[in-house]
Amino acid sequence: MRGMVSRLMLFIYVFPTIILLIPIYKMFTMIGLWNSFLGLIIIYMALVAPFCTWLLVSFFETIPRELEESAQIDGQAELQLLSE
């Protein structure tokens, strides 16, 4: 499942955004989000989130599993592993 989600994110990032320009314009004009901050935030997140997700997944895969295991042996909870 995790591999499929990362491939889907990469596929979305590879998809040319210029093709989406006219449909996004028409859709945002119809729902009243054109020329608004909320519309800008939605578009920016939709275009940047796949790249950021793909970049972070590739970074987290480089962290050795032994480092996580040693932190668990030292008594760290799973949420504490990510925060420290």
Image (cartoon, rainbow, N blue to C red):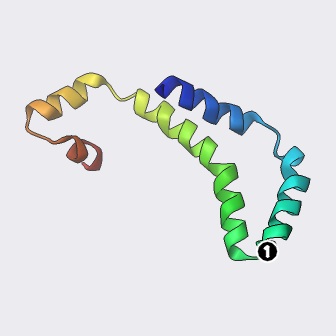
- Residue at numbered disc 1: 32
Comparing 76 with 8, the one in front is: 8
Residue 7, given in percent of the width and then of the height, sits at 60, 27
Report which quarter residue 28 is drawn in.
bottom right
Compared with 6, 82 (above or below) is below
Residue 73, given in percent of the width and then of the height, sits at 9, 30
Relative side of 44 to 54, left or right: right
Compared with 63, 41 (above or below) is below
Going by the picture, which residue comes out furthest to the right?
22
Dot 1 crowding, Cα within 10 Å, few <14, some 14–19, many 20+: few
Q: Amino acid at mark 1?
A: Gly
Residue 66, given in percent of the width and then of the height, sits at 23, 23
Residue 35, given in percent of the width and then of the height, sits at 80, 75
Residue at point 79% right, 74% down? Answer: 32
Relative side of 55 to 23, left or right: left
Numbered circles on residues, count: 1
Residue at point 82% right, 46% down? Answer: 17
Residue at point 50% right, 31% down? Answer: 58
Q: Secondary structure at mark 1?
A: loop
Comparing 45 with 84, the one in front is: 45
Compared with 49, 3 (above or below) is above
Residue at point 41% right, 34% down? Answer: 60
Relative side of 67 to 50, left or right: left
